[in-house]
Amino acid sequence: MSESLYFTAAANDRAARYAELLPQLKALLENEKDAIVLYANTAAALKEAFGFFWVGFYRVVDNQLVLGPFQGPIACNRIQKGRGVCGKAWEMNQTIIVANVDEFPGHIACSSESKSEIVLPVYNRAKEFIGVLDVDSDSYNDFSNIDEAGLSAILAFISENINA
């Protein structure tokens, strides 16, 4: 695969864009097992494809979420279980979509420009929780079940390949 992403004019809606992105990511990352490589190029591809404000991964290290590869402004280094959207997604072991981060109890404001957020669990091949994918938007109510489905499909691919 080349170092560029390509989308058809039909991919103007998010569902179509996710559908076109996934095979390109698979081609780019096929046979890759290293978590950092998988996370880094996935974050870059999501940022490029959708123009999200912030896209990144947090990894479980020593019972904390520790910042991993990301695209966007600087971010929080470490997050405790149960704190903020990422920590709550870890604690609950489920995806969380937040329409307005200012209304989320205990939201950690790494950037005041972040307005909405989706956080999904990341698992390894053994289905063990190993981190989260965090995507922020600078618009309110920017994420839906379409994003959850598209991002979940990408994470399923990562989970099948990751050595972690």
Image: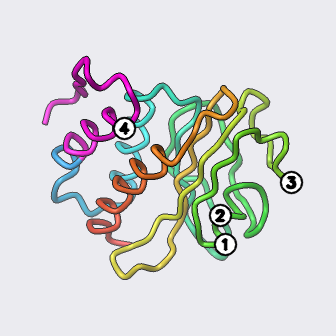
Q: Distance between the residues labelled 2 and 1?
A: 5 Å
Mark 4 residue crowding within 10 angstroms, few (<14) / some (14–19) / many (20+): some
Q: Is residue 31 above or below residue 110?
A: below
Q: Name the residue under label 1.
A: 92
Q: Position of residue 34 (x, y in %)?
A: 31, 61
Magenta span has 59? no
> What is the spatial separation of the Cα atoms under label 2 and label 3, in whole angstroms?
13 Å
Label 4 sits on residue: 15
Q: What element carries label 4?
A: helix
Q: What element carries label 3?
A: loop
Q: Which of marks 4 and 3 is in front?
A: 4
Q: In x, y percent, where is residue 104?
A: 81, 49
Identity of the residue drawn at 86% across and 54% down = 105
* Residue that label 2 marks: 89
Q: What residue type is labelled 2?
A: Ala
- The residue sitting at 64% across, 43% down in the picture is 117
Quadrant occupied by the N terminus: top left
Q: Name the residue under label 3.
A: 105
The boundaries of the magenta stretch are 1-25
How many C-alpha atoms fall within 10 Å of the one at disc 1: few (<14), some, or many (≥20)?
Answer: few
Separation of residues labelled 4 and 3 (CA atoms): 30 Å
**Nearest-to-viewer mark from 1 and 4:** 4
- C-beta proximity under 8 Å, tags 1 and 3: no
